[in-house]
Image: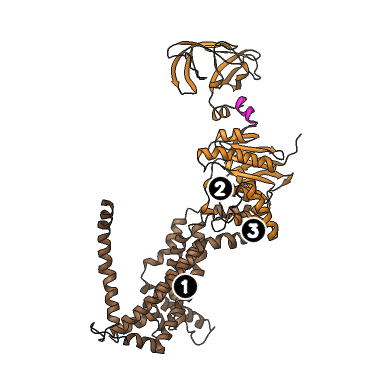
Amino acid sequence: MRDRGLVLALLIPGLLAMLATFILPMAWLLRASFSTSTMVQVGFTLDHYRAALVDPFYWKVALNTLTLGLTVAGVAVVLAYPIALFLARTTSRWRGVLTALAVAPLLTSAVVRTYGWMVILGDRGVINGTLQSLSIIETPLRLSNNSFGATVALVEILMPYAILAMLAGFGRLSVQLEEAAAMLGANPLRVFWRIVLPLSLPGVLTGALLVFVLAISSFVTPRLMGGGRVFVLGTEVFSEATVTLNWSLAAALSVMLLVLFSSVIVIYQRALRRLEA
Amino acid sequence: MTERHVSVENLVKTYPGAAKPSVDDVSFSLPRGEMLALLGPSGCGKTTILRMIAGLVEPTSGSIRLNGREVSGIPVYKRNMGMVFQAYALFPHMTVAENIAFGLEMRGIAKADRAAKVARALDLVKLSGLGDRRITQLSGGQQQRCAIARSLVIEPELLLLDEPLSNLDAKLRDEMRDEIREIQGRTGVTAIFVTHDQDEALSMADRLAVMSAGRLEQIGTPRQIFDRPETEFVASFIGAGNFLNGRVTAAGEAAVDGFGALRFVGDAAVGQDVRLMVRPHRLVMGGAANSFTGTVEHIVYRGQILTMTVRAGETRLQADLHTHAGALPEKGQTVTLGVAPEDVTFIGRAA
């Protein structure tokens, strides 16, 4: 069939690009994780996986990563939901401007924003400085160099993604459905619980997934805000690869992170299908 | 005087920033069990009136009464009115039965009673057996039926329908038109529906309220609106019309260019300049009362009818005649047409 040939021909450039930028590096990563050398890819060994799985430190790191991801996703979704709902429902002519404002933080790099949070949450930062000068506290509160600081910064940095994802997922919401429910005798609270919330759940789930994935793969923010005291898979892969120069262990950890991602995505898709069935 | 079930008095809605009111001093009332059509071109304020009655739009001034009680302060969810939305607004995350049961659930009706009422409502709209379907599995007509069942199962004081047939294809529209009328008759619910389609309004409603630019032009039965339009807008919006200028020479008789004396129905003083209207299909071949002779300027054979433009003096008239297999008028021919005096309507003073 000529059509099929044309389809294949049109697919080739995209497939080649995917092959070069995604599939080959992934294959290389997989190969490196089984290498007997730490730098070059030779032989075959399961040592790196064994090392990662036997060492309680990496279990703790995996648990930290999961906790950080879930916390950040949960908080970001709760904070972003009212904003996204407002943006989706407003008929104001400022809607475009407001949407742009909500996602404007994406225009600055995450590194810059992390430094901003260091200034705000640091021991001599804006909050501690103010509280100390007002003599409300004597010793600075531990707001940064710990997982609290990392969580706060990640929530703020990732919130615009949550807002965007939710807006995209709110397609089934409509003012008319809310009006229909009200006409049938539902007060505003019941309209929210029975109509708005169920119909916005796919968007909420998409937002949560996106933030979760971005949070567990982040390493700059946890590293800077954690002050070297927050260990997550992202920071560990980075330090194994650049400090310890153990590329094979870094590759094994990356593969494990990938497995974590994939299982979350599978669970997410199952849940979404049930929601939209 | 009949009981006023619903009455709207001096209703005004001016949206913030708008120069002119969208609804301008509209008053009408309905007896129990009546079906009223709000008819007018888009933007005439008909939907705004419906939404004000529903409580979805706050009136600027005026009053809306149900059983003599003012409803303005009552929130939407306590008004007990049913509404069928143009796009149906069925809840996509619920089944057909769950959609219909929603209003009953909000009223705290026990589950067993709910099921019985839902079954009866499904039966009323001929959707029995489809209660477990998802909304997306229904056809357009079935969705329409589901929306009607949902708004009737709560036994509303008043049923409101916003362009109920506009989302259906032509064949289904005729079917649903009869069916809505039948369901309304069977349940006896007082109903107001909004439409821009004159056929729909004429065939479904007990009375029509014709609107233009926020104002109520005329309210009356289909026959009153069609045969005795009181304004030029009503006469031209509903059906086609030939508008004639004349001067009243005697009671019920006016001198019109090309006709000579034309007898009409309506009160107009002798010597007054008047505007008269004749429907094209009410003109007949041959001389009756009100006969006149003219030249056929233009003619179109359309199967069932023959549309021709006849010029008499300086007056041009459109005449729609029923066709038959025999000889028909031809272009350039001189024809004599007539019209019964009761088919000549006095619209008002000539401008």
- In front of the other: label 2 or label 1? 2
Residue at 35% from the left image edge and 87% from the top image edge:
A50
> Does mark 3 fall on the same chain as mark 2?
no
**Please, what is the three-letter code of the amino acid marked with disc 3?**
Asn
Q: Quadrant of residue A118?
A: bottom left
* Residue under disc 1 on the same chain as residue under disc 3: yes
The magenta region covers B218-227
Give the amino acid at mark 1: Ala
| Residue B219 is covered by the magenta coloring | yes
Q: Quadrant of residue A117?
A: bottom left
Q: Colour in which chain B is shown? A: orange
- Describe the element under mark 3 as helix, strand or loop: loop
Give the side of residue A69 with respect to residue B64, left or right. Answer: left
Q: Which residue is mark 1?
A: A73
Is residue B325 at all visible to an observer of this figure? yes
In depth, the one of A155 and B124 nearer the eye is: B124
